[in-house]
Amino acid sequence: MSSLLEVRGLAKRFGSVRALDGVDLDVAEGSLTGLIGPNGAGKSTAFACIAGAEKPSAGSVRFRGREIAGTAYHRVAALGIGRTYQLVQTFADMTVLEAVTTGALLRRARLRDAIAHAQEILAFVGLAEKRYRLGRALTVADKKRLEVARALATEPTLLLLDEVMAGLTPAECGAAVELLRRILARGVTVLMVEHVMEVLMPIAEHVVVIAAGKTIFSGTAAGAVRDAGVIEAYLGSPLEHGEIAGHAP
Amino acid sequence: MTARPHLYALGAIVVLGLLAAFGVRDAVVLDLVFTLLLYAVLGQSWNWISGYAGNISFGHAIFFGCGAYASALCVTHGLTPWLAIPAGALAAAALALVTGFPTLGLRGHYFSIATIAVAALVETFARTTPWLGKANGFELPIASGWAALQFPQKGPYVVLALALFAAVQLATIALERSRLGYYLRALRANHAAAASVGIDERRCKLIAFAWSATMASAAGVLYAQYTLFIDPPSTLALAISIDIALIGVVGGIGTLWGPAAGALVYVVLAKAVALRFGGAGKGYDLVIYGAIICLIAALRPYGIVGTIVDAIRRRRGSIAVGPGAAAETPA
């Protein structure tokens, strides 16, 4: 399998803060790749840099073999990268159908065709009955579903999902996983950020672990939970405790 | 959503307006209808950039002024005032692009501040430039007929204002059902999410702003041909920009009929106070108007038409009725 997305040495500084300091990751075409890491590791910043919402300070982002680092946000969407947000960003005063139609307009010249495509996507994600609701009147789970629908309507090659499971009940999580499987079956490649590793374990073929802005592991999910470096990043190392206590070499 | 009810409503207004234009002889009533239509056009023009796109303009009078001055310049140079319609529109659109290009992609209030600054510059420029009549402005030479766009009675002016109003409303109905309309509403609701589905904010807003300026300019041409006298205070002043913005806010930002409703409240209130109190009542209308704006800001931030739309949606069940549901305002 070829790499759809290749990120090398991605760095992002906010003033003197190094949010990202060397992130490498590969996403194989047609796969579901998980991006995990402890709180504050830089997962969402990495996402923002890939999607074009933030300009990386250094490093390369190649999508379908083409360098896209620093490309304007709206152009990245046109190239075929869709995304959702960790904190849902709905179009509050648009109906569900209008919001998804807005996404569908990216690849459709006529409004009528965009509406028809949006209806199709809404049926696919299971929001068809709620299509005349306003975005702001939905539950959290439905808002997340709406974000996925809006991104899918742009017909992305690569879908970036930022903690779509966070804040969902176990039953809602189950439904979300089922939706994810169907999205993959459509041929969309998925890169998803998750804070909780258990969610990713059964569905991700490949996981990338970042900590303190760096990639520290890349491999299978099963391998990640056995990796000493990953365990250390999540739980903290004895050496670090030693440093804090003043016994560093 | 179908456009049919809106088209019927517009048709009814056009019929009523034509009846007034041809049936009513009372100049005061015709003046009222003309002013109402003109303000409704200006309010809708403002609504494109400030309502649908969500960037508040406090300098809209200058686009109105572009049309009025284009008209005065054409007539005083022996050209047909019809030429002022495209000329004023080009000048207004160019001003809009120059004002909007550096500011419409920015967050915060830069755009609003820029509109105030550019409006002040334009007003000062007109006040001090000989070929723009300086502070004296222009008196348009009297003529008559469709070629000169001047009429001894007010009826034809009402017909022209009605045509302009209908054109602007039709354009707005089309906007609501177009890619640009969807994109502007998405940008107003959430610019980051809008970019994530491929929307180019600056491009969309510049297009909306240019059209907005064009509409205001057309109203300016008509105004100059109607009053036959223009000067900076009557066409370019900040007070006019504020009036235009208030009409948009009172009626309901980002709604098709909001500007017309706002203009109705504004014009009727001004006339009612003038009739009731005469010259002694100068300023009373502004006091009442101010009170209405305070009430709308406190209770109904969506304005008159926004409140009605909300009520309809509530009945259809597209909004969850509960605390906070209506309190959320668009960012």
Image (tube, coloured by chain):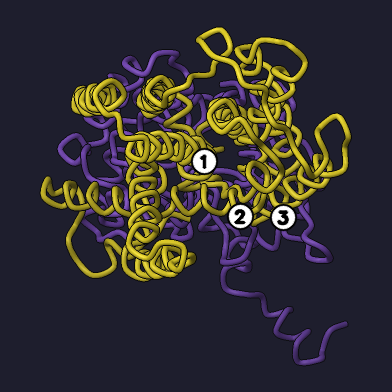
Residue at 19%, 47% (x, y): give it: B313
Q: Count the marks: how many?
A: 3
Rendered-image quadrant of the C terminus of chain A = bottom right
Q: Which secondary structure lies at badge 1?
A: helix
Rendered image: mark on residue B46: 1
The kind of residue on which mark 2 rests is: Ala
Q: Which secondary structure lies at badge 3?
A: strand
Chain containing the residue with disc 3: A
Q: Which is closer to the viewer, label 1 or label 2? A: 2
Q: Is the residue B118 above or below the residue A225 in the image?
A: above
The kind of residue on which mark 3 rests is: Lys
Chain containing the residue with disc 1: B
Q: Is the residue B222 above or below the residue A92 in the image?
A: above
A60 on left or right of B5: right
Rendered image: mark on residue A214: 3
- Can you identify the residue that label 2 sits on? B239
Q: Which chain is yellow?
A: B
Residue at 57%, 50% (x, y): give it: B56
Rendered-image quadrant of the N terminus of chain A = top right
